[in-house]
């Protein structure tokens, strides 16, 4: 089970930190990711992290977003800085058993997610 928190409303240029608490299973070997879905758009991969802590990011968020994880607490984070109105979306935490080991840094484009969180809303106003 994955549960997100930390969403909210901010002005452009602001920051938010999303958290994803993983419970009921140790996702240590999983490829973990954050996806987002804006109204009228398809869900897209934003950031991912492997079991070896290798991270990958979508071009739209690289240098602004940072994904990390706390292995002791089994919590995954997405630090979002310099937020833009186009970052407005529902953000989902996701667990993928193996894609990151098959596709390397491009794995967010080939997800095979088996567990989704319920999502948390992020709204950025101009």
Image (spheres, helix red, strand yellow):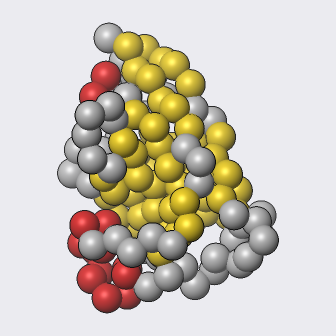
Q: Residue furthest bottom?
A: 102
| Residue occupying image coordinates x 26% and y 34% | 40
Q: Is residue 14 above or below residue 99?
A: above
Residue 105 point in image, percent of width and height: 28, 74
| Residue occupying image coordinates x 42% and y 64% | 48
Q: Is residue 11 above or below residue 31?
A: above
Is 74 placed left or right of 12 in the picture? right
Is residue 76 at all visible to an observer of this figure?
yes
Is residue 46 at all visible to an observer of this figure?
no
Q: Is residue 102 above or below residue 28?
A: below
| Residue occupying image coordinates x 40% and y 21% | 124
Residue 59 point in image, percent of width and height: 21, 51
Quarter of the figure with the N terminus: bottom right
| Residue occupying image coordinates x 76% and y 65% | 23
Q: Residue furthest top?
A: 126
Is 100 placed left or right of 68 in the picture? left
**Which is nearer the eye, 30 or 42?**
42
Is 125 placed left or right of 7 in the picture? left
Q: Is residue 73 above or below residue 40?
A: below
Q: Quadrant of residue 5?
A: top right
Residue 28 point in image, percent of width and height: 63, 80
């Amino acid at each position: 089970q994955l549960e997100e928190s930390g969403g909210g409303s901010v002005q452009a240029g602001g920051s938010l930190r999303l958290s994803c608490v993983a419970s009921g299973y140790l996702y240590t070997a999983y490829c973990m990711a954050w996806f987002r879905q804006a109204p009228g758009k398809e869900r897209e991969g934003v950031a991912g992290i492997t079991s070896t802590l290798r991270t990958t990011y979508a071009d739209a968020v690289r240098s602004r977003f940072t994904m990390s994880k706390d292995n002791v607490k089994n919590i995954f984070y997405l630090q979002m800085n310099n937020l833009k109105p186009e970052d407005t979306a529902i953000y989902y935490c996701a667990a993928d058993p193996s894609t990151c080991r098959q596709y390397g840094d491009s794995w967010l484009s080939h997800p095979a997610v088996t567990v989704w969180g319920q999502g948390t809303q992020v709204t950025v106003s101009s």
